[in-house]
Structures are given as structure tokens and as C-alpha cells.
Image: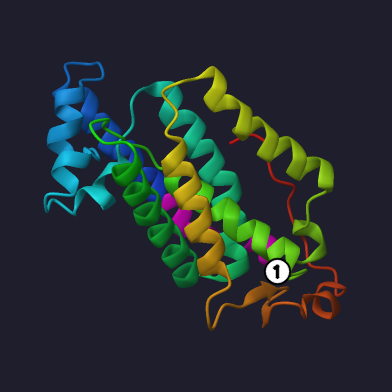
Amino acid sequence: RLSRMRPRVTHGLIALIAAVFMLQMFLGSGGYDPVVATVLGANLSSRTLSGEWYRLITANFLHGGMLHIYLNCLALLSLGGALERLLGRWTYLTVFMVSAVGGALASALYNPGVPSQGVSTAVFGLLGAFGVLHLLKALPIGYRQTRGWWTFTLGVNAVLPLIVDVIDVAAHVGGFAVGAADARGPGREVRSGGTTTGFGSCGDVSRRGCLGRKLRPGL
């Protein structure tokens, strides 16, 4: 059953993010240091677009403080854990990485001179992928969300940048768009109760009683 599958990739990603954050704190003498973040690979447009392309990856594993890493990892645990069960580990990891890189690239292009970091690029990509699966009716019953859940989730994340001006909107939008596009890519299948099914055909399989989890609304 899907609910019994341990999301090992998600757990591994969170462990890696936590380890990188501890390194940031250690090098920053117990606090966040933007210089340390830049040295470790934060996404600084002038350097990224000048050939330091590795920053499109490394920036996603850096964070700007305890609240930043806590909220991102909480969302990753909830949404990532569900998608890892649905897509399988390798497909899930692919969606995660292309969303992370796509979001970071969008940030570098639209936020020149502003350093960016955080795994929210990938989290929004996973949300975009989840949304596509929902629209295509490819989700097992236990994983489908109500219209109210989607309204609340998208609404909160649309309003937050108006309140918190440090939120990187370009990174979120870029990650969301890339994740949504990748979820509809060739060969994408959704698991249901130990089997896989193509998009749009999940309903018959899901009636076997596949167990699911409700997702937390906040990102």
C-alpha cells in the first residue's frame, strides 16, 4: 500500500538540507551570514549567469534562518512524501531537481543583484506537479484535495509576498511552472495500491481502497 511506503528520498533530502544548514550556522558563528551563504553557493544572479551554474543547484539547499528551513522542510515532508509515494522515488527526484533548477534560474533572471536560497523552489514545483495530477484526475481517492484546500493553499502563497517582501516570487513561480510541466512529461505514471496507472485512468484502481493522507495546507 502507498501509505506504508517510506519516503526515503524525501527524508534524505531533508537530512541533507539540515546538514547544510548546520554547516551554515557553524561557519557563521552560530547565526546566518550572507557572505557564508554566497561562498557555499547561494544564487547570486551576477555570478550564476556569469558561468557559476552550480549555484542553480546548491542554492536550493541553503536557508536564511530557522523559520525559513522549518517551514520549507515541513512542506517538503508533507507534499514530497505524498508525491514520492505516488510517482516512485526516481520520478519524484527528477521532478524535485528540475523544479529546483527551474525556480533558481527564474530567480537569477528576474532578480538581478538579489541573492536567493531555499528549497521552496522545489516545493512549489512539487505543488505544481500535484496540481496537474489533480486536474487530470490521476490521484487516488485518499490523495485528492478539495477546492477549498486549493483555494486556501494558493491564496495564502499569493498573499504572503505582499506581507513578507523577502519572498522570492520569481523562484516560486518558476518552480511551480517547471514542476507542473514535468509532471505531464512522457512516461509519467501514478502508483495506486501497489500498481501504476497512466494519467486519467487512476479512478478504477483507486476504488480498491488505497490509503492516502491529507496534506497540510500551508507552504
Q: Nearer the viewer, residue 75 or 116?
A: 116
Q: Is residue 75 magenta?
A: no
Look at the image and tell me in which quarter the C terminus lies. Answer: top right
Question: Residue 73: x percent and y percent?
Answer: 48, 38
Can you say whether 1 is above or below 26 in the image? below
Can you say whether 9 is above or below 121 in the image? below
Q: Is residue 34 left or right of residue 204?
A: left
The secondary structure that dominates the magenta segment is: helix
Residue numbers of the magenta segment: 1-12
Image-quadrant location for residue 83: bottom right
Residue marked by disc 1 = 1
Label 1 element class = loop
Image-quadrant location for residue 166: top left
Image-quadrant location for residue 97: bottom left
Question: Residue 52: x percent and y percent?
Answer: 13, 50
Look at the image and tell me in which quarter the N terminus lies. Answer: bottom right
Q: Nearer the viewer, residue 86 or 46?
A: 46
Is residue 64 visible from the viewing direction of this image? Answer: yes
Q: Is residue 157 left or right of residue 138?
A: left
**Residue visible at 45% across and 22% down in the picture:** 67
Q: Amino acid at mark 1?
A: Arg
Is residue 60 visible from the viewing direction of this image? Answer: no
